[in-house]
Amino acid sequence: EVQLLESGGGLAQPGGSLRLSCAAPGITLSDYALSWVRQAPGKGLEWVSTVGTTGADTFYPDSVRGRFAISRDNSKGTLSLQMDSLRADDTAVYYCAKGRGASFPDSRTFDYWGQGILVTVSS
Amino acid sequence: IQLTQSPSSLSASIGDRVTITCRASQGISSYLAWYQQKPGRAPNLLIYSASILQTGVPSRFSGSGSGTDFTLTISSLQPEDFATYYCQQVNRFPLTFGGGTKVEIK
């Protein structure tokens, strides 16, 4: 059974930083694109970022581009999200998600998700 | 690409046939997925490429459509199906989700 385990959430002040991590013991992460998706309290799902299998290709929506950076370490089997210049509207549960495959369209369809980790941005 | 789901919520009884629609603001071929989410849980992939059932998902779930109009159907609603359902387009970045449809017990 594939498991994705997020860590690193918590409380940050506006303008501050947090780094999220996601580990996937037992699977070869390098075979799949990986993503982050968030969900603000009581709201719907919002895609945050995607990274290709090698880490060279990264994608962001306008809402986080320039503030967030996704990366992966295939040797360690980990995914990260560096979040800078945090704002109150970044408050959400953040999920790491595994693509069904390495290339379009499977890379953008999420077949396994982590349990989610809460990020709260507040003074 | 904006995705508009309808209805935003519905009430149904066990055994009912339920249909949820998702309309894209521009054509996305068949590059659409459907997810189910229960309270406090991560989403679960049900359907991808508009009509392909994910492994392990019960056959009472089905998807159809292409271009701009898509449908998720539950042929006979079961107690475990009460949840919120989201469509997602994967045709181009930024990836987008519909606003969700909450299926409640009548």
Image: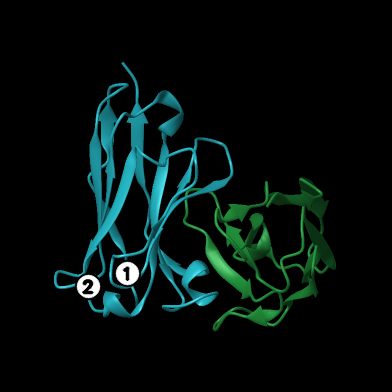
Residue at the (46%, 46%) spot, across then down: A38
Position of A52 with respect to A77 (left or right) is right
Residue B106 appearing in the image? no
> Is label 2 in a helix, a strand or a loop?
loop
Position of A72 with respect to B34 (left or right) is left
Crowdedness of circle 1 by 10 Å Cα count: few (<14), some, many (20+)? some
Q: Are marks 1 and 2 in contact (CB under 8 Å)?
A: yes
> Is label 1 in a helix, a strand or a loop?
loop
Say the numbered circle drawn on residue A3.
1
Q: Nearer the viewer, residue A83 or A58?
A: A58
Residue at the (27%, 29%) spot, across then down: A11
Marks 1 and 2, Cα distance to the nearest angstrom?
A: 7 Å
Residue B21 coordinates in the image, percent (x, y): 81, 59
Which amino acid lies under the numbered mark 1 shown in the image of this protein? Gln
Say the numbered circle drawn on residue A61.
none
The total of numbered circles placed on residues is 2
Name the residue carrying label 2: A25
Which amino acid lies under the numbered mark 2 shown in the image of this protein? Pro
The chain letter of the cyan chain reads A
Residue B63 coordinates in the image, percent (x, y): 75, 74
Residue A96 coordinates in the image, percent (x, y): 37, 57
Q: Is residue B42 above or below residue A63?
A: below
Residue B46 coordinates in the image, percent (x, y): 61, 71
Q: Colour in which chain B is shown?
A: green
- The answer to which quarter of the image holds residue B76 is bottom right
Residue B8 appearing in the image? yes
Crowdedness of circle 2 by 10 Å Cα count: few (<14), some, many (20+)? some
Chain to which the residue tagged by mark 2 belongs = A
Colouring convention used in this rendered image of the protein: by chain
Q: Nearer the viewer, residue A104 or B47?
A: A104
